[in-house]
Amino acid sequence: MIIPKNLLERDDFYTEVIKKCTYSQEDRSGNYDILRQYYLFGAPDGKSTAFNKIYPHVDLLESFLFASETTKFAVHPGEGSAVHEFGRTSSLSRGVNNKWHDSNADRVSSHAITWSLVYGSMLVKLIPKVDSKTKKLEINPFPVHPSSFGVLREDLAFSDRQEAMVHTYYTTKSQLEIDLSAHPQKDAILASATGTRGETVEKPSGVQRIIMGALQPLSQADGTQGTVDFGMSQQNKYLPEVDDDLVMMDELWIWDTNENDYRMVTRIREGMTIYDRISGKENIFCRGEHPFIQFSPLPLPFYFWGMSEVAGLATIQEWLNERMGQVRKLLNLQVKPPTSAMGLSAPPDEEMYALFAEGGLLAPPTDGAQAGKVERYAPTIPNDIFAAIHEIMAMFADHSGLPNILQGKGETGVRTGKQTSDLSRLASARIKKRSLVIEDSLEKMVTLYLKLMQKFDTTIYRDDNDKEFTAAQFTNDFSVKVDAHSNSPIFSEDKKELAFSLLNAKMITREQALEIIDPPNKEKLLRDLKKIMENEKAAALAEKKDEQAKSQGE
């Protein structure tokens, strides 16, 4: 974009761009509220259900898409790079992996993937910080709720293709005053900052109920609209409450054509511009890059926010809620069926109490009338009452591409381990496709890690020849990849089979096989392997000497 030179025109320009980027925020926020309630509680208004199948199902699906403890990254120089660059990759790969885990990026990524299945998209923002004393780089990844983010073109997938994007967040007035301690216009900015007490990214509970009731009513077992309440309507809704004045802020990242870089603009919503800086020039971030990574397991080509997994599961959950409500009603009627009592002397309420109390006693009529009569009308419960519920639950797995064989459940007709392995490989096609989409986001994120290390980090590394170098001295033509698809557990067996096949064909060494398999305590195994190889070499040499001695003696 061409940014106006005049300050007043520029300020109006920023206001207009932010307005366009945040155009759909309110509508999307209402939909996200509903999806969140379905995920946490199995119903759109937050009331508890007999069994919320969505939560454990999404948890299982995420575990197939991302395994934080096994995910490893490898640095690859570009084609045509100098030979010595390849000798630096092992050390730099370890540095990237250590930086990744030290910053808790594995946990943040796991949360982002889980909630991207709920909302359709989730974002992670990287904030670099250099310690003023130690000069060490810290990279802090933060999850960003999609309702707090906006883009200029929602019809374009991928954030790198956006000309402008906005991150909306809240800060306290006291924190804003600290952040502006050295700002020349501190007093004027604080005067324009109007805070709202208790405001958060989530809508108030009353507004949520209006939105949810209007958009997605739930049919009960008797056909009426509403939500079946199983006695836990006062449960924790897991919504934040802040008893302080919060100021709404907008952080605009906009591409400046003249600077060939992103411009980061920090503003108070409906207020003043606080900062207007060129990202790479003022060491805010890497030149030509923005700090946001999008996770969207079900991307759509012409809709930036992607498709929600939970939205597809919600209808199945409603059906499950309806059926469970019917079963619960039938069982209650069996325990306490409708009852008629005739010719008894006690009042009706006392008769009912006696009929259903342990050791209850009904007095016969005392006026010589005909003997009393009691009849119960318990409903007949079908023998296969739970069969439909099992079929509904199976639909969750079918929807997400998780057949029984992948979940460790048996399949009829499968008798051998090879059959199980072959079926698992074929059945994992759909889930592999999604895990590769997640892998792209992880690679984008860790590539930014290495770029930030090149720009800010002063850590000394050693190459294969024991020569010192820094990340800044490494080539700029590189890529960082998930090593051997280690982000997903469904690739683990394939990785092991490949390693042993290459080893048996003598195409790799035993050290390389250990690197591919990545077993627990790998570093100790590598050290022990060196000793084993030395002993084997010594034994082979001794055997050779014995053979030579025997041949000379003959």
Image: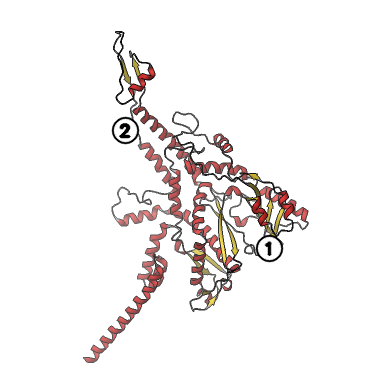
Quadrant in which the C terminus is drawn: bottom left
In this figure, which residue is indicated by the disc labeled 2?
A: 383
- Residue 203 vertical position relative to residue 543 in the rendered view, above or below: above
Q: Residue at the spot x=29%, y=8% of the render?
A: 368
| Marks 1 and 2, the one that precedes in the sequence | 1
Residue 263 in the image: state x and y as whole percent: 68, 59
Identity of the amino acid at label 2? Asn
The reply to whether discs 1 and 2 touch (Cβ–Cβ < 8 Å) is no
In the picture, residue 449 is in which quadrant? bottom right
Dot 1, crowdedness within 10 Å: few (<14), some or many (≥20)?
few
The residue nearer to you, when weighing 82 against 146, is 146
Counting from the top left corner in percent of width and height, residue 191 is at 73, 49
Label 2: element kind = loop
Q: Which residue is mark 1?
A: 260
Residue 459's disc number? none
In this rendering, the answer to whether 113 lies above or below 464 is above
Q: Where does the N terminus fall, quadrant-wise? A: bottom right
**Residue 476: image location, x then y, percent:** 58, 70
The amino acid at mark 1 is Asn
- Relative placement, left or right, of 481 versus 541 is right
SS for callout 1: loop
